[in-house]
Amino acid sequence: MRGTFYGIGVGPGDPELLTIKAANILKTVDVIIAPKTEKKEGSVAFNIAKPYLRDDIEIVYQVFPMVKGFADNSSDAWEQNKNEIVALLDAGKNVAFLTLGDAMFYSTYIYVFRLLEKAGIPIKTIPGIPAFVAIGSHLNWPIVEGDDVLSVIPATASPERVKEAIKAADNVVIMKVYKNFAEIAETLKECDMIDKAVMVSRCGLPDEERIDDIETRAQKPVNYLSTVLARKR
């Protein structure tokens, strides 16, 4: 009998922020898929989930090349990863794919989900806490209140779209700022939000960093796991 594939959001960094449902599933699955980058050893998502894993669990590390959007003709690496997962499921094993934050929110898991869905695989997705939600609570920073309009913006979008989204909202969450942090800081300044903004890198992890003076920090590199919260009033 084919196993079940689980996509599990492990939250932003603190293992205690996993849901009870996620923790219970992690204790029962046979295999963990731990995504990692090509340049670094280990998996942040795996380290977050580690306290909930059995000692005898099978761990499979997979490298997923970064993609812009998703196409039907995915790369060889993605196809190889999909085939490896399908083989494990066909062997009757229940497999959990770990992803930072929430599984359906700017996640590599979404592309894996689409590949496996096309293959007719049974899939269950378990939500997790997105980084910006954790940051708001951690800093006692209300994200939206009353009739506020919130924009969640990927900094990788065109400068024009970023600026339009900021101008249309009362409060903003800006993600993926690691590549063009200086440009984002300049846009926040133009929109009169630079003094009402905060950035947190690696929220909930031991080396978490909070940056309140974004303008001063703008010319220095920031960590991949960095998120900006800003508001107009």
Image: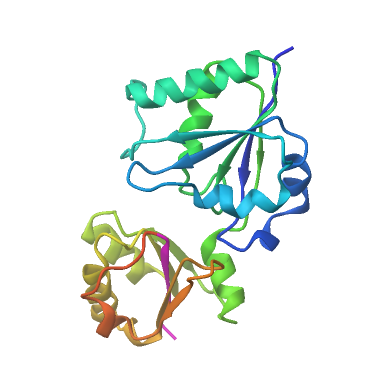
Question: Is any part of residue 31 visible from this angle?
Answer: yes
Q: Position of residue 60 (x, y in %)?
A: 54, 32
Rendered location of residue 156, percent (x, y): 29, 54
Q: Nearer the viewer, residue 233 or 113?
A: 113
| Relative depth, front residue between 163 and 77 | 77
Residue at 70%, 26% (x, y): give it. Answer: 94
Q: Is residue 231 magenta?
A: yes
Q: Is residue 75 above or below residue 176?
A: above
At horizontal 56% and vertical 74% (from top left) the residue drawn is: 136
Q: Main secondary structure of the magenta part?
A: strand
Corner quadrant of residue 63: top left
**Residue 98 horizontal side relative to residue 62, left or right:** right
Asked whether, in this view, residue 102 is left or right of residue 21, the answer is left
- Count how many numbered circles sit on residues in the image: 0
| Residue at the image point whose x is 35% and y is 69% from the top | 166
The residue lying furthest to the front in this view is 55
Please check the rendered image and state whether residue 70 is part of the magenta-colored stretch, yes or no: no
**With respect to residue 153, does 119 lie above or below?**
above
x and y, in percent, of residue 164 in the image: 29, 64
> Where 19 sits versus 119, above or below?
below
In depth, the one of 158 and 76 nearer the eye is 76
The boundaries of the magenta stretch are 225-233
Taking the image as drawn, is residue 144 in sight?
no
Question: x%, y% of residue 35?
Answer: 48, 40
Q: Can you say which quadrant of the picture contains the C terminus?
A: bottom left
Task: Report the front residue among 65 and 40.
Answer: 40
Would you place residue 98 above or below residue 172 in this image?
A: above
